Image (spheres, helix red, strand yellow):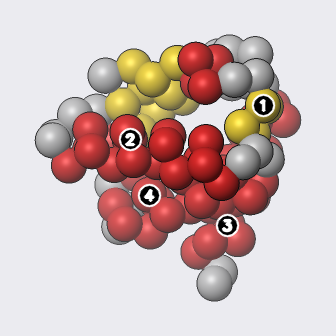
Amino acid sequence: MEVVLSNYGEVIATDEKSQEIYDILKKSIDEGQVIVIDAKDVTISTKSARFIFGRLYKELKGLFNEKISFKNNSSLFTFSVNEGILTEVNN
């Protein structure tokens, strides 16, 4: 399954938007789908990255990279996701 983040806006930074994206990803993973995140032209706050991808990283217990991949992600997007995951894992 491909999730095009630009469908949710150019900037993902609100709790509501983060929850919406998390719910979609979680449901798809629970259904056994592998997800490709298309992050073209999208910026994500570290807080939202922590809420979405940090939580999923902890829940998937080592299967994160098998279940979720990214394409068209900028270096800033990747940095935010990595920081979000790292912050969540350290808490």
Residue at position x 75%, y 16% in the image: 41
Instruction: Indicate left or right for 49 with 30 as reference.
Output: right
Q: Mark 1 points at which residue?
A: 11
**What is the spatial separation of the Cα atoms under label 2 and label 4, in whole angstroms?**
9 Å
Q: Is residue 62 visible?
A: yes
**What is the spatial separation of the Cα atoms under label 1 and label 4, in whole angstroms?**
20 Å
Q: Name the residue under label 3.
A: 86
The answer to which of 21 and 72 lies nearer the viewer is 21
Residue at position x 20%, y 49% in the image: 30
| Mark 3 touches mark 2? (CB < 8 Å) | no
Of the two numbered discs 4 and 3 in the rendering, the one whose residue sits closer to the viewer: 4
Q: Name the residue under label 2.
A: 25
Amino acid on which the number 4 mark rests in the picture: Leu
Location of residue 48 with respect to 32 vertically, above or below: below
| Element type at mark 2 | helix
| Element type at mark 4 | helix
- The crowd level at tag 2 (other Cα within 10 Å; few <14, some 14-19, many 20+) is many
The answer to which of 71 and 16 lies nearer the viewer is 16
Mark sitting on residue 90: none
Of the two numbered discs 3 and 2 in the rendering, the one whose residue sits closer to the viewer: 2
Amino acid on which the number 2 mark rests in the picture: Leu
The answer to which of 88 and 27 lies nearer the viewer is 27
- The crowd level at tag 3 (other Cα within 10 Å; few <14, some 14-19, many 20+) is some
**What is the spatial separation of the Cα atoms under label 3 and label 1, in whole angstroms?**
21 Å
Q: Mark 4 points at which residue?
A: 56
Residue at position x 15%, y 41% in the image: 31
Instruction: Indicate left or right for 83 with 22 as reference.
Output: right
At which x and y percent is residue 73? Answer: 69, 24
| Element type at mark 3 | helix
